[in-house]
Amino acid sequence: MPVSVLVLYDDRSAQVERLAHAVAQGAQSVPGVTALLRKVSEANRGDLLSCHALALGCPNWSGIPARLKAWLDEQGDLWEEGSLAGKPGSAFVVGRGRHSGLEFTLLALLHWMLACGMLVVGLPWSKEMERSGSYYGATATGAVTPEDLAQAQRLGRRLAAVALRLYPEEGRNAPGG
């Protein structure tokens, strides 16, 4: 069984969907890793429990949109059960403006992961972040640019590489691993 990265996102924004696909593409580019794209409207608790790593994405609506927040809340006391503890996680967000609270929303997603005992995977500083992005996760402001997509792919690769280091047996036994 290959290492699996669940890319779970609120699909009410075409921009978020573009970043989600880029994150999945980046994760999939790591040998021994497979990416599973799931819209929050199609996801279930089993998707969370069976993945080795999780990337959460949403539009910025002064924080996590209600639909995604409600879905996360409905999954039960994952933090108390320890069901996600030790799994790596990352986040990606889109917004309309540079100062619209993108980092706040990223931190809210990461806070949920930390509460569940997950290991947060961000992005190391890069020159591209002067124009776009955050080391907390991948972001896009307004229309998604090629730089935004490249940053999302880097985040997916980084998350997949961390998951592969944490679950080396699964990666070695995967086709292409």
Image: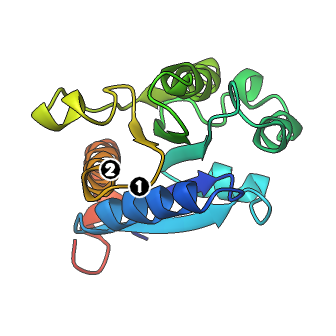
- Provide residue 79's location: percent of width, then percent of height: 71, 24
- Provide residue 49's location: percent of width, then percent of height: 66, 50
Can the viewer see residue 3 in this picture? no
- Provide residue 62's location: percent of width, then percent of height: 69, 24
Badge 1 element: loop
* Residue drawn at x 20%, y 28% as measured from the top left: 130
Residue 111, above or below 92 = above
* Residue drawn at x 53%, y 67% as measured from the top left: 36
Residue 51 occupies quadrant: bottom right
* Residue drawn at x 82%, y 28% as measured from the top left: 77
Which residue is under mark 1? 144
Residue type indicated by callout 2: Asp
CB atoms of marks 1 and 2 within 8 Å: yes
Badge 2, how many Cα within 10 Å: few under 14, some, many 20+?
Answer: many
Which residue is under mark 2? 148
Badge 2 element: helix
- Provide residue 23's location: percent of width, then percent of height: 39, 57
